[in-house]
Image: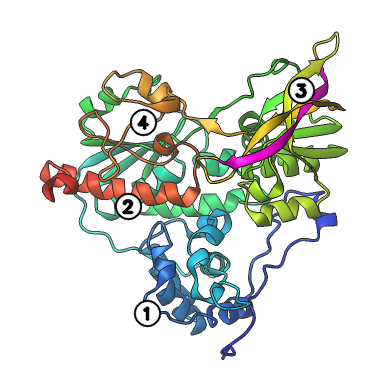
Amino acid sequence: MPSKHPSRQEMPCQDPGERIGNFNEVALGFSENHARLEASRCLNCKNTPCIDGCPVGIDIRAFLTFVVEGEFKRALEIIKEKNTLPAITGRVCPQEMQCEAVCTLGKVKNGTPLAIGSVERFIADWNAMHDTGVVIETPPRTGIEIAVIGSGPAGLTAAGELARLGHEVTVFEAFHRAGGVLVYGIPEFRLPKDVLEREIEFLENLGVRIELDTVVGKTVEIQELLDDGFKAVFIGTGAGLPRFLGIPGEGLVGVYSANEFLTRTNLMKAYNFPEYDTPISVGRHVSVIGGGNVAMDSARTALRLGADTVTVFYRRTVKEMPARSAEIDHAIEEGIQFRFLRNPVALIGNEENRLVSMKLQEMTLGCLDASGRASCEPVEGKFEKVDTDMVIIAIGSDVNTICTSSTCNIETGRRGRIVAMDASQRTTMEGVFAAGDAVTGGATVISAMGDAKKAAKEIHEYITSGTSSNETSS
């Protein structure tokens, strides 16, 4: 039996010197002993702040209790009641800013919060390895058909929730592979494709159908889906439209958006080069612009694809970087360089229109802005020039409006985001709901899943009673 008061168990990882030469998963996962020791640290708080901190409301205290007892299948059943994608969220969910941020263990002097995400990942992986065949009870099929647009975190979650309610769900995905940002935006070394495929297979076993190579707004329109018999439509298309700097030289050869760079790497299997000959050329001296998780993913991918040096340029300091601390630490361990308080103002090419250098302006921090971070201001007259033959721009993304532009009935707002009522996720088009990054702009996987769960509940109310629970309660 695990001891009562062990110290926090740290996630074992590949050695940095080895992992920069492969795309294998960096975090190796807990052993059974690690997981049980870590779960035994839970204080079983009566007010369960960790559950309140989880966007999908997993009963964390309950599943940890089963882990301590070695009842791993039962623990997964508890998790799956609220989260259909635990192997994914256990890897990419920012628990340190959510459930772990409010863990009582982290509030005491010299305390460290329980590694909830690491234990969740262990449970999902252990059950898959031992083929325990966790089955979700579903009611009799209703025969009601619902369309889900997009197979990213929001779309998969909505599809799973609606299938569990007995409805016939068809997911329409534009790419030739399901998963959305989970498959084309996150590198193999953070989220292996076979893990994602395993979670998608679970949804298919619930009855979810996935139609690939279908661009809603081009191949078929939303109104056509409704006319063809779908009683409701859920939009979970995410935010996949790259955002650029708006400076001279962005059209030069050697300049990529992070979206394009990571999509080519993931969907065209550049991580298996030379087995797969992927049309992506990585420079010798790569510069990545941005400070979020996508910037870290881009920098670490470029290094693995053969860059001699990779440098991240960020206009604030490390304190303001939105990337997860673990991803920053991993990048530093792997030899990624960082230049702070630097902002590109021009990209410079040669006579062949190829990128050769970048002009940077020195920045300084000012007062806190609307996001709660220090604003940054240019230092007048302070510029420098650095040599670089590849720039990856990772400063965020906007909503691609292909899905909504073909209908005038769906209202969109800033940066093309779909306008949806917070309480019901209903759009301005009858029978159409939306959630995730398509509504909020770029956010976390788990927040998209949380909003998609709300939308699924509202869709169920809408198609079974003709209204939403928000309306019936008002």
Task: Please tell me how crowded label 1 is: few (under 14), some (14-19), or many (20+) other residues with Cα within 10 Å.
Answer: few
Q: Closer to the observer: label 3 or label 1?
A: 1
Name the magenta segment's main secondary structure. Answer: strand
Mark 4 vs mark 2: give the one in front.
4
Q: Is residue 262 left or right of residue 252?
A: left
Residues under labels 3 and 1: Cα distance? 56 Å
Classify mark 3: residues with Cα within 10 Å, few (<14), some (14-19) or many (20+).
many
Which residue is drawn at the image coordinates 80% and 42% (left, top)? 303
The amino acid on which the numbered mark 1 sits, given as a three-letter code, is Lys
Q: Which of marks 4 and 1 is nearer the N terminus?
A: 1
Q: How far apart are marks 2 and 1 (CA)?
A: 28 Å
Q: Callout 1: helix, strand or loop?
A: loop
State the residue at coordinates (76%, 61%).
Answer: 14
Residue picked out by circle 4: 418
Mark found first going from the N terminus, 4 or 2: 2
| Residue beneath disc 3 | 254
Identify the amino acid type marked 3. Answer: Gly
Which is in the foreground here, disc 4 or disc 3?
4
* Gap in angstroms between the C-alphas marked 4 and 1: 39 Å
**187 left or right of 19 in image:** left
